[in-house]
Image (tube, rainbow, N blue to C red):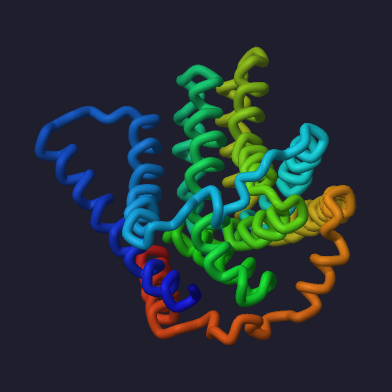
């Protein structure tokens, strides 16, 4: 399974780039004005389409091969809480990577304020949670899984991060992807990672909605952005902010760990998880996790990201 999925990963990257270029060309030729929400839908479709073709070609039984099992309401709530407690960690990593890379998400998310709140949640939180969990924690992670949980989680998280094709998102998406994969193992259900993914993505939308509901919300957002930009010129301020954010992230990460342990114990998978993770990265199924197609894809993706960031 590792060899097969590693041959698919470069196809996923190349097809995503080609489809993005084709979509842009069609829009340019036809002169169709695609709204921002439409662009988000197209981007998710571009990720999903190659995966569906792969499933069809290899006749993969999605229900049998991916754990779309019923999730108890209490476990669903814990999964949401885990997602929200991971937000400070995501913000910390984003802030560190933002020192040397461009944040491509912030501007586009702020443009969504004009849309209804339900639509913002749908395209920023619900749709990616469904599509990306299917592709990365479903198809890719579970193709690696029989060869070892830790290696599968790390590699699927790395591919998830690389798929964003920019250094800023790579940094925190890879970490979140690893945690989401382990959450699937803790519950035995992909619905848990979908809920945690939704929580992590919904943070910015909910925050902007709350700010916009206050008087002068738009001005407050603009002033906050200007203040953040001006503070970047002060090294002591930057260090102080990162230290504070790092401490907050560490505290909430501890809470996330306790919630994770609780949900794993509730599902009778805590001892199993410890045993599997203790095996480390050693292949369990006689296959190599890393093959030439994967190496080539990772190298090409990193080269591309470095090129657009610094050249």
Q: Position of residue 187 (x, y in %)?
A: 75, 50
Q: Position of residue 166 (x, y in %)?
A: 45, 60
13 to the left or right of 20: right
**Residue found 65% across the figure and 36% down from its top:** 203
Q: Is residue 208 above or below residue 259?
A: above
Residue at the extreme left of the image, as rendered: 29
Q: Position of residue 102 (x, y in %)?
A: 48, 56
210 to the left or right of 186: left
**Residue found 72% across the figure and 39% down from its top:** 71
Q: Quadrant of the C terminus?
A: bottom left
Residue at the extreme top of the image, as rendered: 215
Q: Would you say residue 26 is visible in this rendering?
A: yes
127 to the left or right of 99: left
**Residue found 16% across the figure and 45% down from its top:** 25
Q: Would you say residue 310 is visible in this rendering?
A: no
Q: Position of residue 5 (x, y in %)?
A: 44, 70
């Amino acid at each position: 399974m590792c060899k097969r999925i590693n041959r698919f990963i470069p196809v996923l990257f190349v097809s995503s780039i080609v489809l993005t270029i084709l979509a842009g060309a069609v829009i340019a030729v036809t002169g169709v004005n695609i709204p921002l929400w439409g662009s988000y839908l197209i981007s998710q479709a571009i990720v999903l389409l190659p995966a569906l073709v792969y499933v069809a070609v290899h006749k993969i039984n999605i229900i049998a091969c991916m754990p779309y099992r019923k999730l108890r309401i209490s476990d669903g709530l814990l999964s949401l809480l885990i997602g929200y407690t991971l937000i400070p960690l995501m913000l910390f990593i984003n802030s560190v990577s933002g020192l040397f890379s461009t944040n491509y998400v912030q501007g586009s998310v702020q443009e969504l304020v004009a849309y209804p709140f339900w639509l913002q949640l749908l395209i920023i939180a619900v749709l990616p949670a469904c599509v990306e969990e299917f592709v990365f924690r479903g198809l890719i992670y579970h193709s690696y899984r029989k060869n070892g949980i830790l290696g599968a989680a790390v590699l699927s998280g790395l591919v998830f991060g690389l798929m964003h094709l920019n250094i800023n998102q790579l940094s925190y998406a890879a970490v979140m992807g690893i945690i989401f994969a382990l959450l699937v193992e803790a519950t035995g259900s992909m619905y848990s990672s979908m809920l945690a993914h939704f929580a992590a993505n919904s943070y910015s939308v909910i925050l902007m909605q709350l700010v916009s509901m206050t008087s002068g919300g738009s001005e407050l957002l603009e002033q906050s952005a200007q203040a953040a930009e001006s503070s970047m010129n002060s090294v002591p301020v930057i260090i102080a902010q990162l230290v504070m954010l790092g401490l907050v992230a560490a505290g909430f990460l501890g809470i996330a760990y306790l919630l994770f342990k609780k949900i794993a114990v509730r599902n009778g998978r805590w001892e199993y998880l410890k045993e599997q993770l203790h095996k480390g990265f050693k292949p369990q199924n006689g296959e190599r996790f890393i093959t030439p197609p994967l190496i080539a894809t990772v190298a090409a993706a990193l080269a591309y990201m470095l090129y657009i960031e610094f050249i």
